[in-house]
Amino acid sequence: MKLYYAPGACSLAPHIVLNELGVSFETEAVSLKTHKLADGTDFYTINPKGYVPVLELDDGTRLTEIAAMLQYLGDLVPEAGLLPAAGSMERYRVLEWLTFISSELHKGFSPLFNAAFPEDVRQVFRDRLARRFEYLDGHLADKTYLLGDRYTVADAYAYTILSWKDALKVGFAQAFALIPGTSRSGATIIGGMLFGLSRRAATEFSFFLAVPTLVAAGGYDFIKHRALLSSADLGMFGVGLVAAFLAATLLAAAGAALPANGRSSRT
Ligand SMILES: N[C@@H](CCC(=O)N[C@@H](CS)C(=O)NCC(=O)O)C(=O)O
């Protein structure tokens, strides 16, 4: 089996389930920017709909749509217990959740990332999404999993979408770093925690958000001020890079020594 996926995308849901099932599978990364594979293959020849995930079976059959894929995977290894038996009420509950996550949560995010929508229209979608999350929040208030105490494929999908919600909150908090003198990591960690994330989850999101942010900000600054730079500055950059690398290694080692508690208050 092969899973066509994109890092950070919803293909994480079948990816989690494939790992949970313990079946052997390969992965193939897809660039959602170019819609190409690493070898240049046009992804539309794999999935004419152009989106991940795609599950390719050993006989070459391809399956798309997360809700269908998760049911296929759950039925593939019934003894793993990730999907209740067909015909049972519990099975219909899983289908109910898969449909809710797909149509109300997953697709509810799309307008928020669409710059073509004016802010007031996006606010309508944001409010709608907030109501859906409130419902989910209330449902999970006294439960460990969507079906109560039983972990199913629907939880893997919900986790994937909830991690976007957390990422959105931390991204919002990062905007405060635009205020001169405000620390980016301080704003994202404190903001994330105020939004209900655990310290560890807020720190992790802040760290991963730092990579594209600093590359983009550093690249922009470099281009803007390139006329001021000369080869004599290279030594200074080298010292800075080595010092940053050593400090990061020390911090990572200290972080690894911390006790591994939950990633966030909800996920
Ligand atoms: N209905 C699809 C939606 C999949 C989807 O939205 N995939 C996104 C990533 S999360 C994607 O690949 N978007 C790229 C595109 O549409 O071009 C499913 O449930 O599998």
Image: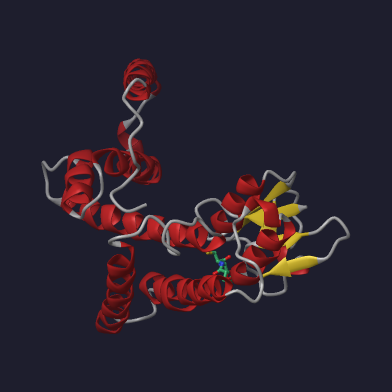
Taking the view exactly as shown, the residue that stands out farthest to the right is 59
Q: Quadrant of residue 45?
A: bottom right
Look at 24% across and 83% down and name the residue there.
120
Look at 18% across and 50% down and name the residue there.
191
Looking at the image, residue 81 lies above or below residue 114: above
Q: Quadrant of residue 89?
A: bottom right
Q: Is residue 181 left or right of residue 229?
A: left
- Name the spot of residue 49 as percent of width and height, x first: 67, 74
Q: Nearer the viewer, residue 253 or 121?
A: 253
Look at 40% across and 45% down and name the residue there.
212
Look at 34% across and 60% down and name the residue there.
165
Looking at the image, residue 167 lies above or below residue 24: below
- Name the spot of residue 184 as percent of width and height, x first: 22, 42
Regarding residue 265, the answer to whether it shows in the image is yes
Q: Quadrant of residue 64?
A: bottom right
- Name the spot of residue 66 as percent of width and height, x first: 60, 67
Looking at the image, residue 43 lies above or below residue 132: above
Picture quarter with ligand 1: bottom right
